[in-house]
Amino acid sequence: MLKQRIITGVLLALTALLGVLLLPSTGFAVISMIVFISLAGWEWANLTRFKGDSPRSLFVISLLLVGVIAYRWEASHWGLIIIGVLWWSYALTLMVRYKRTQGVANQTWLLPLSSFLVLIPAWLALLELHSQTPVLVLYLIFLVAIADSGAYFAGKAMGITKLAPELSPGKTIQGFKGGLFGAGLWALLAVWFFGLSFENAIIFILLSLLVAALSVAGDLYESLLKREAGEKDSGTLLPGHGGILDRIDGLLAALPVFTLGLFIVGGIDV
């Protein structure tokens, strides 16, 4: 399983690298739509109890239709990205209150609806970030991956206090801190690589740490979906990793926050 996981991880990293750097804007938009809305949407439908191919197909078609309309209506991009950030603010309160014995109670309708508030804003944020500076897309992808890996290894070595026992018993506060430490080192390396001024460096590092912390919310929200559905993984498309959602869950929360943060501070000249 570990060997399979490593091979899949390397292939995913190479695919992301080539796609981000070589694809033109339109091609990148199409490919990322397939990943973020079509494939992830199909898995989301499965986790929110859409039974049968026809209901799931209609669910994905609805996501694609809204996504295409939003993509063509460029004036809506930032508004939807802001809605995505606001959704994650609410999702944090939802996850804090979550009890395994109660589930989401009378809010089961929220789980499929939230796909529109998560997948589409994240995809639009990805497109905005790519249109400005493709290398920052790679930076963010690796920031989230390093935070996740740091949390895993720190949690294995020192994990004692559970971070969210009702959602993901394996996550610990010590692991969370380890993830932030790894993200901080990656941000410092990026500051040196980009040659940022002192002021921009401070802003960039603080934003990166905030985004790394919030990427955990994406992971935990997917855990909530899987717990409600009684599933271990979101799918089986990626050997050793599960499904698409299992790989991009952290990015779904990180993308709108990172992209909006850069927009608010007027961008970072890299």
Image: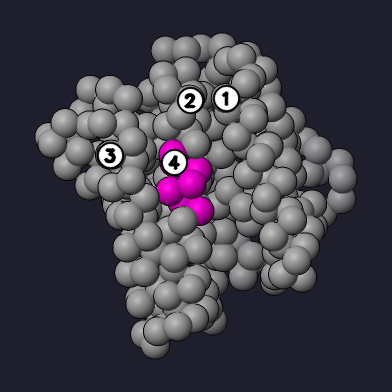
Residue 41 x %, y %:
68, 42
**Quadrant in the picture for residue 214:** bottom left
Question: How many callouts does the rendering have?
Answer: 4
Q: Is residue 87 left or right of residue 184?
A: right
Instruction: Name the one closer to the observer, 143 or 52.
Output: 143
Circle 4: residue type: Leu
Marks 4 and 2 close (CB-CB < 8 Å): no
Give the residue number, with chain letter if any, for mark 3.
191
Marks 3 and 1 close (CB-CB < 8 Å): no
Task: Say above or below: 35 vs 263.
Answer: below
Give the mark, 3 or 2, whose residue is nearer the N terminus. 2
Marks 2 and 1 close (CB-CB < 8 Å): yes
Residue segment shown in magenta:
139-145
Circle 1: residue type: Leu
Camera-near label (4 vs 1) is 1
Give the residue number, with chain letter if any, for mark 2.
134
Residue 134 x %, y %:
48, 25
Give the mark, 3 or 1, whose residue is nearer the N terminus. 1
Q: Residue at x 78, y 44 (%)?
A: 56
Q: Which numbered dot is residue 21?
A: 1
Q: Residue at x 44, y 68 (%)?
A: 151
Residue 64 x %, y %:
68, 28
Residue 132 x %, y %:
41, 19
> Residue 63, can we see it?
no
Circle 3: residue type: Val
Label 4 Cα neighbours within 10 Å, binned few <14 / some 14-19 / many ≥20: many
Give the mark, 4 or 3, whose residue is nearer the N terminus. 4
Q: Is residue 143 magenta?
A: yes
